[in-house]
Amino acid sequence: MKKIGVIYHPLNEAALPLAKKVAEFLGSSGVSTWLCSAWEGEQLRQQVPGTDLILTIGGDGTILRTAQAVAPRPTPITGINLGKLGFMTELNTDEVMTKLPALLAGEGWIDERAMLEVELIANDEEHKSARIFYALNDVVVARGEIARIIYVTASIDDEPLTTYQADGVIAATATGSTGYSLAAGGPILHPQADEYLLVPILPHLSPDYALVLPPTAVVKLKISTTHQAALSVDGHIGLPLSSGATIAVKHSLNKIRFLRIRPKNSFYSSLEQKLRG
């Protein structure tokens, strides 16, 4: 590896000192490095071309922000965990320096994760506009600040499904199945699965079950509310939604690649430990 980026969480006091330590170690090994805050998305995006590996220092949120900047490039990510759960991270802080030489030597394996493509079609009196986003974890359509249910009319492959009367609806990848979706009652998928989930949030007098959808499925969610709703993509892209807005969700052609050093079957052995904190 000739060039490695080191991305750190800017609000975690331990992140930047560790990032500098890692960069110094890489430099002494003859590797060109660059540092960037995970919150500087555009700067991060400009640095990615020509980079062989990105190390993130923080938690899963840091990885999610990094993934937004990396896609659709195939640059792999290895996460160093400073957070609590770290479902997507690979290394703990006390093993970084001992494991990095193995990664630099070409050891490890590539873990490919599916993403969702999200199209927001805003409908107002003056015009229609469409915007595209990509999600590694989940897409959430939910009520805004006022605590009242919203109506979400859902269809799958243009076939009507139901109208959810709920706090919202989650579309989650397999990677995101251990996050908000799980808290809302959804199942856990193997992280390398291409299927994705549709999960209502606190439904009232409407279906309360989660659906596991094939990667070919296209979900459309149309919002009806007298108050403002909200769209959240991977927990850090947030946009207001007005009544009449439609969100189309489908499997993305883009994938995020993680460079792993742990055994391939370690997901199941570590699952309960992480869920119990």
Image (tube, rainbow, N blue to C red):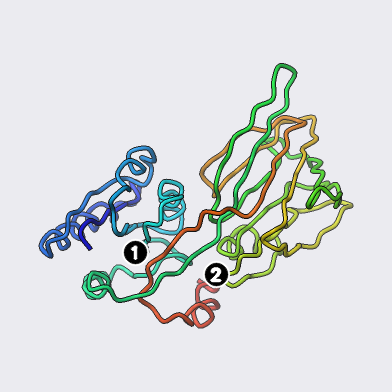
Query: For this view, does 263 lie left or right of residue 224?
Result: left
Q: Is residue 189 above or below residue 15?
A: below
x, y (%) of residue 247?
A: 69, 41
> Which secondary structure, mark 2?
loop
Nearer-the-camera pick, 214 or 207: 214
Nearer-the-camera pick, 157 or 236: 157
Question: Which dot marks residue 42?
Answer: none
x, y (%) of residue 163?
A: 85, 47
CA–CA distance in space, label 1 to label 2: 20 Å
Residue indicated by mark 1: 80
Picture quadrant of residue 227? top right
> Which secondary structure, mark 1?
strand
x, y (%) of residue 138?
A: 60, 53
Residue indicated by mark 2: 192
Q: Is residue 21 above or below residue 117?
A: below
- Residue type beneath disc 2: Gln
| Pointer 1 local density, CA inside 10 Å: few below 14, some 14–19, many at least 20 | many
Choose the circle earlier in sequence order: 1 or 2.
1
Q: How many marks?
A: 2
Q: Quadrant of the N terminus?
A: bottom left
Residue at point 75%, 44% (across, down): 221
Nearer-the-camera pick, 18 or 160: 160
- Work out which residue is located at the far right of the displayed protein and give it: 205
